[in-house]
């Protein structure tokens, strides 16, 4: 009853907490909605095939994805023969997939999934909308959605793994992509890994009997389980998006705990007198603590009910940009995710209770005597628990930084962020230690003036208030300096690395295509790699390895691959090609400079992987013009590759900085607003003592600036300190010295932004209540 | 309600202030005592130490025969909740709660569910029955003090401490508050200890205790006229100079 009465009566004084939680919940609800909406889906092309068979999985790769082998042609025939007798199966349709792209168009990342066999159109329930089915090689039915205007009877110029081709369009269909004859598709694809069934009857029952018929030579999938058939390419795109979303949730949750903890502490210290009165009226410390928890839980719930729907509404608006930035596959849409919305509300509650824990403990120690004192001028701002937790998180953060060089590369960024979060917590906890000296130093020159005196005494007796208002600035500046500095340092280091060992050569690189076709490559004199993937059996295990075909190369392994596969020169490796056939090849060479973990003769690779593409030709002679390829210097090519990766990193960076900065900027404003609003009586007394409105404003502005400066200095210090840790890790990785790049501009920029917000937020409550009567 | 050789020192070492210096006092049940003395003489300190709001430096305080000096914070809170009532000069009420809610606060904190009739009875006693649903901000200073008295009375405490309850009020509201306190003593046998500067207020008490420099310097019993109190006060302030 009491918590509700207090929350309702003094909602304004909880504004900071409310805003912080509402925003945090909105961020989490939005990110989690996007994340959950992006679970693998059964491809739309399989809509009319409720029961499907996937080729056997032979193990999992480093991304914990299944390694699926292909069926050989004879296995396919065998499977079809086994399945056909089941009367409820009306058709057994293998689904070969291959690369097709219309000449002159840009690949949006899925061109390698666009070529199909005409019979597979039935799996999606697609029909001819005009013309007839393809009957011989060189004929194609194209999706109407794909290319308007080209009707049956025309022709179309395309690029495939073979090279540029001109096909006759015999018809159009309501499905997407290109449909050629079954035998043509089979010949072009890198093996078949999916068979679709068209059926009449209950899919589950049919699936059971299909399982009985084929045994272990395939995995039968029905309904939503067919999501396992989503192409790995699409799943990878989702994975990248998921990384960003996970980072957003973690950062959002951290910022929320952080800001909630400091606003709760602020509220608690502003209410000392009221809490003292409660204690005098007979409340036990435990009851005071419970009251604080109850109030915060209420606020968190209200904030969650505002924030969660906001997040859910925002998610669909973010989905579009995510697709265009390549963070989600085409066709991705944010859907209504009750779990995300409910979970976010719950998380907000938990995070808020965690944030209020310390404040509640402190509030419960308010003595009943506090009721008798005017707004207590605190004398001791550092408590033992502040010291203990501050030093503990300092030790943990510094330890994490020190341990970074020995960590796996993937976990380094996470460790850096974790260390920064711990150090930011340290800075917030230990802030009161530096605030005192800093205030004395800053106000020294104006000690004689009234403003100087008021600011000095006001902040020195309100160190915790300053610490609370400085906290959001601290996170903003700290995170900005760390994130931008981290990327700049790594970029710089990588830049030197690239420039160091790129030969002065000319290369032929793909031009808006996923790779170069055979014709383009064979027209050139130079060296190239034909990339494929092989599954190597060693002992009882199967490992997927990236392999490449190099003209005239001996069978070569990198030392790492040789170790993993237990192979040595002269021993044979048993591998399965992309087309499902197996081979045993003797290892001829183990080479540190091998172009890939497994290097194989090019013609062998081409024979077993008809759809393989070449990523790059390093030219020896004059370049020959080739469709879908462009000529540039090796150096430019390398720079482009780095830039492309850099673009993605930049995108991540801007989203994360935008999120933290946006979040904390709002927190800066709301915290200061509530801190200043609570000081109404103080300012009124000041006015009554003869201060003009301008003088009061000068005092509040100076205090706001002081808080911003404290936050910016501490945040900057944490950022730079974390950066040195990141640099040490990068140096260790590269085995040489790396320059530390401190992003002054970004750091100072956000600090100024925070200061402006802080000043504006303090002026509002002062200007809004100018009347002197109570 | 008894104090034995109670000493209270603030601060440490050289800048320590002795606010109470071995004070002995007994407040008999059903009596109304006024505590007077010059500013800084230790009146508020005496009250706070007696009520267990503050810890004494030396000596012993007993409420209802229970020595409170060694009680844990929890036990002390319980004792305060059930056996002690307070009325301060200002800021007696939780701003978020209505008058009625403020009155029942001690009972609710003790985990009891008060009868609505009980609340109405208490508010009627202080003449505020029709203001039950109002918040402190909507009440005058005198009305707020009356709500505070109703709250202090609701637990039927062994003793009520009041620190200048009329200090912030005009003469009429002050008189009303004093009349309420007096009634509580006469009708319910309530024990009250009240700090005041005002001889007129002190005249409502059965006994007047004079403090100076942390010591009891005078103790007048029986109905004491305000003129006599004023004379005593003047004499004390004279000697303090
Ligand atoms: N928290 C404190 N810290 C230090 N000294 C204190 C504290 N509280 C009171 N004192 C000192 O103890 C002495 C007694 O103070 P007390 O408040 O009891 O006086 P008082 O008689 O109530 O005065 P007044 O009539 O002005 O209210 C004073 O000298 C005062 O300065
Ligand atoms: Mg006093």
Image (tube, coloured by chain):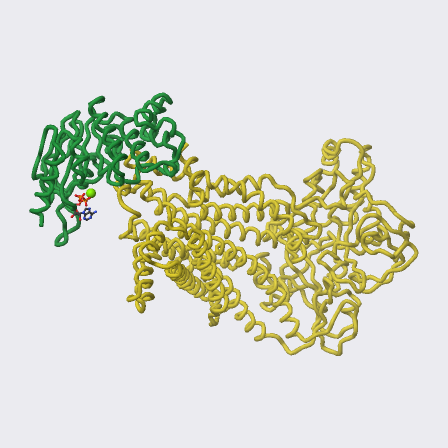
Chain colours: A yellow, B green
Reply above or below: A528 against A653: below
Please provide percent x and percent y for residue A388. 32, 51
Q: Quadrant of residue A499?
A: bottom right
Please provide percent x and percent y for residue A169. 89, 56
Q: Quadrant of residue A100?
A: bottom right
Reply above or below: A656 against B75: below
Q: Is residue B46 left or right of residue A3?
A: left
Quadrant hosting ligand 2:
top left
Given residues A254 and B51, the one toward you in this image is: B51
Please provide percent x and percent y for residue B23. 10, 38
Q: Is residue A759 left or right of residue B186?
A: right
Q: Is residue A714 visible?
A: no
Q: Is residue B87 left or right of residue B57?
A: right
- Residue ID at (57%, 41%): A341
Given residues A261 and A690, the one toward you in this image is: A690
Tag count: 0
The quadrant the N terminus of chain A occupies is top left
Q: Is residue A486 left or right of residue A625?
A: left
- Residue ID at (68%, 76%): A633
Q: Is residue A104 visible?
A: yes
Please provide percent x and percent y for residue A528. 71, 69
């Amino acid at each position: 009853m009491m918590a509700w009465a207090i929350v309702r009566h003094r909602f304004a004084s909880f504004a900071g907490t409310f805003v912080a939680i509402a925003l945090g919940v909105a961020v989490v609800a939005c990110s989690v909605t996007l994340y959950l909406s992006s679970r693998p889906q059964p491809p739309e092309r399989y809509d009319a095939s409720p029961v499907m068979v996937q080729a056997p999985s032979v193990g999992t790769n480093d991304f914990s994805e299944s390694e699926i082998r292909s069926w050989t042609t004879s296995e396919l025939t065998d499977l079809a023969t086994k399945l056909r007798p089941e009367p409820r199966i009306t058709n057994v349709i293998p689904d070969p997939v291959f690369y097709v792209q219309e000449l002159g168009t840009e690949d949006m990342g899925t061109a390698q999934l666009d070529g199909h066999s005409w019979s597979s159109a039935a799996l999606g329930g697609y029909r001819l909308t005009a013309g007839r089915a393809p009957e011989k090689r060189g004929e194609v039915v194209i999706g109407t959605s794909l290319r308007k205007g080209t009707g049956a009877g025309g022709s179309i110029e395309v690029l495939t793994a073979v090279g540029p081709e001109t096909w006759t369009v015999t018809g159009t269909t309501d499905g997407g992509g290109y449909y050629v004859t079954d035998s043509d598709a089979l010949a072009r694809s890198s093996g078949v890994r999916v068979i679709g069934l068209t059926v009449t009857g209950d899919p589950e029952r049919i699936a059971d009997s299909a399982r009985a018929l084929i045994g272990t030579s395939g995995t039968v999938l029905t309904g939503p389980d067919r999501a396992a058939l989503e192409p790995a390419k699409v799943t990878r795109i989702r994975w990248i998006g998921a990384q960003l979303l996970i980072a957003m949730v973690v950062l959002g949750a951290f910022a929320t705990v952080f800001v909630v903890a400091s606003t709760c502490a602020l509220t608690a210290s502003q209410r000392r007198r009221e809490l003292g009165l409660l204690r005098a009226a007979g409340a036990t410390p435990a009851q005071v603590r419970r009251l604080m928890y109850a109030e915060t839980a209420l606020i968190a719930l209200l904030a969650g009910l505002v924030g969660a729907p906001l997040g859910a509404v925002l998610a669909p608006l973010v989905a579009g940009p995510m697709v265009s930035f390549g963070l989600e596959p085409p066709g991705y849409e944010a859907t209504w995710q009750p779990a995300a919305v409910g979970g976010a509300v719950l998380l907000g509650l938990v995070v808020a209770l965690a944030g209020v824990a310390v404040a509640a403990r402190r509030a419960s120690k308010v003595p009943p005597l506090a009721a008798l004192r005017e707004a207590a001028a605190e004398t001791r701002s550092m408590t033992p628990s502040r010291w203990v937790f501050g030093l503990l998180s300092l030790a943990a953060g510094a330890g994490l930084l020190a341990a970074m060089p020995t960590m796996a590369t993937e976990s380094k960024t996470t460790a850096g962020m974790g260390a920064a979060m711990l150090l930011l917590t340290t800075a917030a906890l230990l802030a009161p230690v530096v605030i005192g000296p800093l205030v004395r130093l800053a106000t020294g020159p104006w000690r004689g003036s009234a403003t100087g005196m008021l600011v000095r005494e006001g902040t020195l007796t309100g160190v915790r208030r300053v610490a609370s208002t400085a906290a959001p600035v601290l996170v903003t500046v700290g995170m900005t300096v760390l994130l931008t500095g981290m990327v700049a340092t790594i970029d710089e280091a990588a830049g030197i690395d690239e420039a160091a060992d790129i030969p002065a050569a000319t290369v032929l690189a793909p031009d808006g295509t996923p790779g170069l076709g055979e014709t383009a490559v064979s027209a050139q004199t130079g060296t190239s790699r034909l990339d494929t993937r092989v599954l190597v059996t060693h002992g009882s295990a199967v490992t997927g390895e990236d392999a490449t075909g190099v003209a005239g190369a001996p069978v070569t392994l990198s030392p790492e691959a040789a170790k993993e596969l237990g192979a040595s020169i002269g021993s044979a490796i048993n591998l399965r090609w992309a087309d499902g056939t197996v081979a045993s090849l003797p290892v001829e060479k183990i080479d540190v400079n091998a172009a890939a973990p497994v290097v194989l003769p090019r013609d062998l690779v081409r024979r077993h992987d008809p759809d393989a593409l070449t990523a790059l030709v390093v030219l020896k002679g004059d370049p020959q013009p080739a469709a879908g390829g462009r000529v540039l210097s090796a150096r430019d090519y390398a720079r482009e590759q780095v830039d492309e990766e850099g673009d993605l990193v930049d995108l991540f960076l801007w989203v994360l900085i935008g999120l933290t900065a946006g979040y904390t900027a709002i927190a800066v404003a709301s915290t200061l607003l509530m801190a200043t609003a609570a000081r109404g009586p103080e300012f009124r007394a000041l006015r009554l003592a003869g201060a003009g409105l301008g003088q009061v404003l000068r005092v509040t502005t100076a205090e706001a600036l002081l808080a911003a400066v404290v936050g910016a200095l501490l945040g900057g210090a944490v950022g730079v300190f974390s950066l040195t840790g990141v640099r040490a890790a990068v140096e260790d990785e590269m085995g040489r010295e790396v320059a530390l790049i401190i992003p002054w501009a970004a750091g100072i920029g956000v600090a100024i932004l925070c200061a402006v917000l802080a000043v504006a937020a303090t002026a509002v409550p002062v200007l809004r209540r100018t009347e002197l009567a109570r | 309600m008894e104090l034995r050789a109670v000493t209270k020192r603030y601060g440490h070492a050289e800048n320590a202030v002795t606010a109470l210096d071995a004070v002995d006092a007994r407040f008999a049940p059903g009596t109304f005592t006024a505590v007077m003395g010059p500013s800084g003489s230790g009146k508020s300190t005496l009250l706070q130490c007696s009520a267990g709001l503050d810890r004494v430096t030396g000596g012993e305080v007993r409420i209802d025969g229970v020595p409170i000096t060694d009680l844990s914070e929890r036990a002390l809170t319980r004792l305060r909740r059930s056996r002690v009532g307070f009325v301060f000069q200002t800021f007696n009420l939780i701003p978020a709660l209505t008058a009625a809610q403020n009155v029942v606060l001690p009972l609710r904190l003790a985990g009891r569910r008060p009868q609505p009739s009980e609340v109405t009875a208490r508010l009627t006693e202080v003449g505020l029955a029709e203001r039950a649903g109002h918040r402190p901000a909507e009440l005058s200073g005198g009305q707020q003090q009356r709500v505070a008295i109703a709250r202090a009375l609701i637990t039927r405490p062994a003793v009520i401490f009041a620190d200048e309850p009329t200090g912030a009020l005009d003469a009429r509201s002050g008189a009303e508050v004093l009349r309420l306190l007096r009634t509580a003593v006469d009708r319910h046998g309530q024990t009250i200890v009240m700090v005041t500067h005002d001889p007129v207020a002190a005249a409502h008490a059965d006994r007047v205790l004079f403090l100076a420099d942390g010591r009891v310097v005078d103790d007048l019993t029986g109905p004491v006229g305000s003129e006599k109190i004023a004379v005593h006060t003047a004499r004390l302030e004279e000697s303090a100079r």
